Image: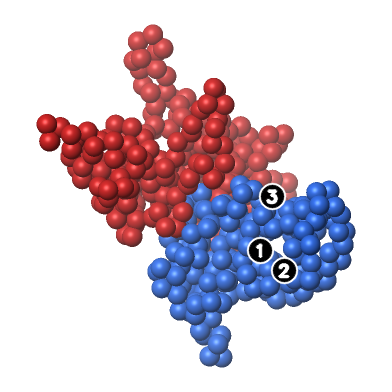
Chain colours: A red, B blue
Amino acid sequence: MKATRSPSRSEARATLDSDGVLTIHTSSVEMGQGARTILLQIGAEVMGADPASVIISMPDTDTTPYDMSTSSSRTTHSMGIAVERAVSEVRRQLVEAAANLNEISSSDLAVDSGHIIIPDTNVAVSFREVMQATGLPRLDGGATYENPGYLNPDTGLGLASSHWHQAAAYAEVEVDDETGKVRVLSCHASVFAGRVVNPVLAELQVQGSMVLGIGQALFEDIVFDLGYIANANLSEYPLPGYGDLAEEMSVSLLEDLRLGEFHGVGETGVPPVVAAIGNAVTQAIGHPVKKLPITPESVLAIIDVLGKERTR
Amino acid sequence: MNPCPQEVRAVKFVLNSDVVVTESPALLAASELLRSLGVFSVRETCGVGVCGTCTINVDGVAVSACLTPVFRLDGTSVVTSEGLGGPKGELHPIHEAFLAEQAFQCSFCTPGFVLATHALLSDVASPNESDIEDYLSGHICRCGSYANIRNAVLRASRLRHLSDQA
């Protein structure tokens, strides 16, 4: 289990321009995790708009609303909910405007792929047509989402975070008792995702978490020499490459659609993967490993001590 | 003859079907020269040839541009990820395969993996698991998208078979 950064806050703004195009204004940073894709998907779904006609802004602190950080697996959860709320507000305004124009109750109207559907007649009016008829330059909605959390520094008591990430992992390893080298044979990570927005990207994130976990468990170690980092390049700080992967790697994403809440999956799978590998090595050599990374040297040292104890 | 330090040499080579004629410090890393020529798919990261992000193809061989001095390019033909596709920006089947399999997250390593895949498929038409490991092991993907990269390599090899038959 891992907490999201708390307290933290995400703000989002959504606008529908007179041409019927929805723009989502957010400061979330795209770094390959797919933030832009999934925030756009969330916005399009809530609005009832065609995703191809939705624009998502680039982060620009001059113009886009506040976000605490794009980190700690929090964007889909925090910014996702803020976007959901901001777009809901714009949708409410649009439906109300369409209802007033047609002199009917807004609760009678449905929205589908960029159109307002008027019941009985089954007439579909595009967002653009509604906006032109209202004569308004734009509809505007803003929303904030906060994750509270505070631990008393004196007592360590309190609510650490209102939002937690849950994951579990399985690992099977092989330990060479002559060289101490650990090889991960198979690995499975299972992450609670609440509601998955984009299955392809979510699965890829958990795949990545497994690779990060293998690296942290077996290779990655920042070495300090007189306060300076002594291994600040990839030649001395090995990252998992293709040959370090487990032969079998699989992921599962658990959903709870009744809860319907987005959960971050970015790094959620990392901690249990590291622990699962550590536990598997412990079982293989019959003695707990207590230090990361689990290098061949550290494994051999344990095996040597165990061997001496046995011969004594 | 190997150049002295600081020596400037005239070099002429083919870069993605364009002829490049330039004068350059002879021992400058090829990645630096290519960057100055606007080739942004060649991305230096470690600078010591262990990460694969600056891979280029020189006369059919995939090499690290950060370890290749400019004078070595003289008289060669250099291909980067940009040059694999068609003249009007058409994608190469390997590009298509990486897109179709979503074989990247941040995509910083992708051009290197694309060229490694190209080298692999040029040598081995139907690669098995150990061929893939051999050719891709010099490349690091920090997002950990290896599973999808593997699927992209297999898809590209299938696409190639299809285009060979056509």
Residue A17: assigned label = 3
Disc 3: host chain: A
Residue B56: assigned label = 1
From mark 2 to mark 3, how far is it between C-alphas? 48 Å
In the rendered structure, are the residues bearing label 1 and label 2 in contact, judged by CB atoms less than 8 Å apart?
yes
Q: Mark 1 is on which residue type?
A: Ile
The crowding category of the residue bearing disc 2, from other C-alpha atoms within 10 Å (few below 14, some 14 to 19, many at least 20), is many
Residue under the point 58% across and 71% down? B118
Residue under the point 83% across and 71% down? B19
Disc 1: host chain: B
In the rendered structure, are the residues bearing label 3 and label 1 in contact, judged by CB atoms less than 8 Å apart?
no
- Which numbered mark, 3 or 1, is in the foreground of this view? 1
Front in this rendered view, residue B38 or A179: A179
Q: Mark 3 is on which residue type?
A: Asp
Labels 1 and 2 within one chain:
yes
* Direction bottom: furthest residue: B166
